[in-house]
Image: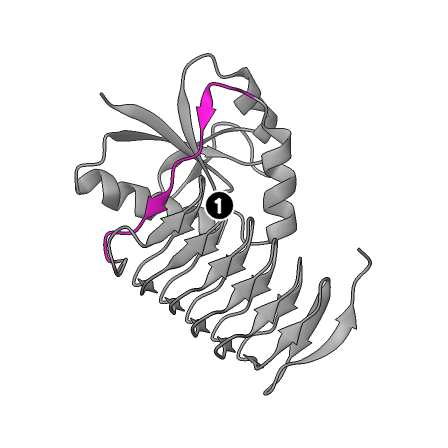
Amino acid sequence: MIKRIAVVGAGGLGREIRLLILELISAGAPWEFIGFFDDQLSVGSEVNGSPVLGRVELLNEEKKPLSVAIAIGDPQTRLAVYQRIKNPLLDFPVLIHPSTYLGEKGRVSLGEGSLVAAAAVFTTDISIGRFVLINNGVLLGHDTVVGDFTSVMPGARLSGHVKLSEGSFIGTGASLINGASVGRFSTIGAGAAVIDAIPDFCTAVGVPAKVIKKQAE
């Protein structure tokens, strides 16, 4: 049975997730991509040849089952958008690019709504929460735990026993050594190297990563 699927967010990430879905459909996934929901674009406009269907709130008016991928890179914005969606007819599938290496079968788990882009590598005993973004070329080592609504951006490297708490953001090309951790809604800058524990609601940059800003909780 073919099921409809749509993407929330029609920016760069949304266009990449559209492509991921089309590649999954080409590989036999039972979906029909129907378009984008985006608050910033007018209904009837097109993005990469696919229609913009309306604002996020229109999802709550859907009368038939619909799968939804929330393609928003910022963790707090992604969480806020998810909280606006109340329709019980919607579901949030896990989408995994066909080029992903998932490691030891049965020892990698991903929560609902998580998105895994091209060329990501998982090894073994890895737990990924709900609505997590694992971007292109990310490497996740053994015993890694990733909290809900986290974003791991392209080329990041996570060694073994790394813990990313809810809503953390790991910048492009960042590295986390064995046993490193990142607190809730904290940001690790691009290219940074995390060698210990970064507290909640902080921004850390550099090699080794140092906290440069503390956000209000």
Q: Specify whether residue 39 is in view.
A: no
- The residue drawn where x is 40% and y is 19% is 65
Q: Residue furthest right?
A: 216
- The residue drawn where x is 66% and y is 58% is 184
Work out which quarter of the rendered image holds the C terminus and state it.
bottom right
Residue 150 in the image, given as x and y percentages of width and height: 55, 55
Left or right, 202 with respect to 120, comes to right
- The residue drawn where x is 31% and y is 42% is 21
Q: Is residue 205 above or below residue 58?
A: below
Q: What residue is shown with label 1?
A: 71
Q: Residue furthest bottom?
A: 207
Q: Which residues are magenta?
A: 87-99
Work out which quarter of the rendered image holds the N terminus and state it.
top left
Looking at the picture, the colour scheme in use is one colour
Q: Is residue 157 above or below residue 217?
A: below
Left or right, 97 with respect to 28, comes to right
Disc 1 marks which amino acid? Ala
Viewer-closest of 87 and 25:
87
Q: Main SS of the magenta segment?
A: loop
Magenta stretch contains residue 185? no
Left or right, 80 with respect to 132, comes to right
Viewer-closest of 111 and 66:
111
- The residue drawn where x is 72% and y is 77% is 211
Name which quarter of the figure residue 22 lies in: top left
Residue 86 in the image, given as x and y percentages of width and height: 59, 23
Question: Callout 1: helix, strand or loop?
Answer: loop
Residue 78 in the image, given as x and y percentages of width and height: 59, 45
Name which quarter of the figure residue 99 lies in: bottom left
How many marks overall?
1
Residue 149 in the image, given as x and y percentages of width and height: 56, 49
